[in-house]
Image: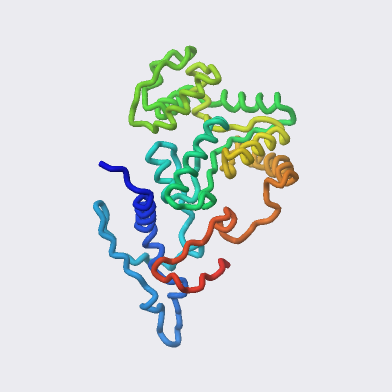
Amino acid sequence: MENPSADSVITTSKNSRARRTGLWDSWADDAFIRDVELGVYFDPAKLHVLNHAGAHLKVRGPLNIARPIQGWPVIVQAGASEAGIQLAAETAEVIFAPASNIVSARTFYSDVKGRMAKLGRNRDHLKVLPGAFVVMGETAAEARQKRARLDSLVHYDSAIASLSIALGHDASRFDPDGPLPAIPESNASKSGRERIVELARRENLTVRELAQRVGGYSGLAFVGTPVTIADEMEEWLLTDASDGFNIMFPYLPGGLDDFVDRVVPELQRRELFRREYEGSTLRENLGLPRPDNRFFPRQAQPHAR
C-alpha cells in the first residue's frame, strides 16, 4: 500500500476531528431566542442535525444543550502510546503527559508537536502538561525527608497491588527486598509499564521501595526548596519539555499553601506565571482559540461572559 500524501493526511485529520466534535456545533451561538411573549424558544434555521453514520456509531443529533461558551469543551488526552500520541496530535488541545525526566519529556514534546505540524495544526493549539508532584522544604534535605516519609506511609499490601496493576503482572510473587525482575509484555498501559521499569532501574529501587513509590506517586516530582523547584520548572518550560504542569500536592491544604505562597511568587518574579487571568474560561486562560462553528461560520462569535 502506498503511503498517503501530505494532503490526504491533513484531510484525514480534519475529517476525524470534525466527526468527533460535530455535535458541539449543533446550534448557532444565537440560536436560542427564548422570547416568552412571542412563544419562540429557538430559531430553527440556526439548528443543524448531524446525522452521523459511521462504522461503529450512528447519531442523529442535535445536542440537547446550547453550544458551550467555549465553543467546544477543551479536549484533553492522556497517555503516551503510539495510538495515544497520534490521537492527541489529531484532536487534543491539552495532553496530561507522562514524564519522569526532562530528556524523555523533550522527546515526547518534539514528537507530538511535530506530528501536529505534519497534520496542518498549529503547534501552539495543544498544551503539553505533565503531571508534577511537588514536595517543598526549607532545605533540599528536608524536602527529600518529606518525600521518603510519604512513600513509607503506603502499606505494602496496597502498594504491591498498585504495582501489579501498573505492570500488568502479579508483583506479589517478587522478592520484596530484591530488584525488579524482567517484566513480560501485557495488556497494561505500555507507556506506564515502561515508566515504572525505568524508575526502578534509574533509582536502583527494591520491589518494596518501588511498590511504595507507585502506591504513592511515581511520576515526575519536583522535590526541593522554592528556588530549586522554580529552577527545574523554568528549565522544562524554556527547553521545550512542557508548556506547563498539572500540579499535584502531597497533602492538603498544606502542600497547596506551600506552592501558592512560596513557589508561585518565585515563578512570577521570573515572569513564568501569570499575575492575573487572561479571561473567564479555561480555553482563554490556556491561550487556546475558540473554535468556529463549522455549520454557522459567518456569525460573529460572542465573548465569553
The answer to whether residue 133 is left or right of residue 38 is: right
Q: Position of residue 227 (x, y in %)?
A: 73, 35
Q: In the current view of this chain or complex, which residue is farthest to the bottom? A: 38
Q: How many marks?
A: 0
Q: Considering only vertical position in the picture, is 6 above or below 227?
A: below
From the viewer's perspective, is residue 301 above or below residue 78?
below
Q: Residue at x 37, y 78 (%)?
A: 45
Q: On the rendered image, what quadrant is the C terminus found in?
A: bottom right
- Taking the spot 34% from the left edge, 25% from the top edge, the residue there is 185
Q: Considering only vertical position in the picture, is 93 above or below 162?
A: below
Residue 219 position, x and y percent, is 53, 32
Q: Residue placed at 25% from the left, 41% from the top?
A: 1
Decide if residue 217 is in sight here.
no
Task: Name the quadrant containing residue 135.
Answer: top right
Report the coloring of the rendering.
rainbow
Give percent across and percent down for residue 201: 50, 19
Quarter residue 129 falls in: top right
Q: Is residue 137 visible?
A: yes
Position of residue 257 in the picture relative to residue 303 (left or right): right
Question: In the displayed structure, would residue 142 be above or below residue 78?
Answer: above
Give the left or right position of residue 59, taking residue 34 as reference: left
Q: Residue at x 59, y 55 (%)?
A: 285
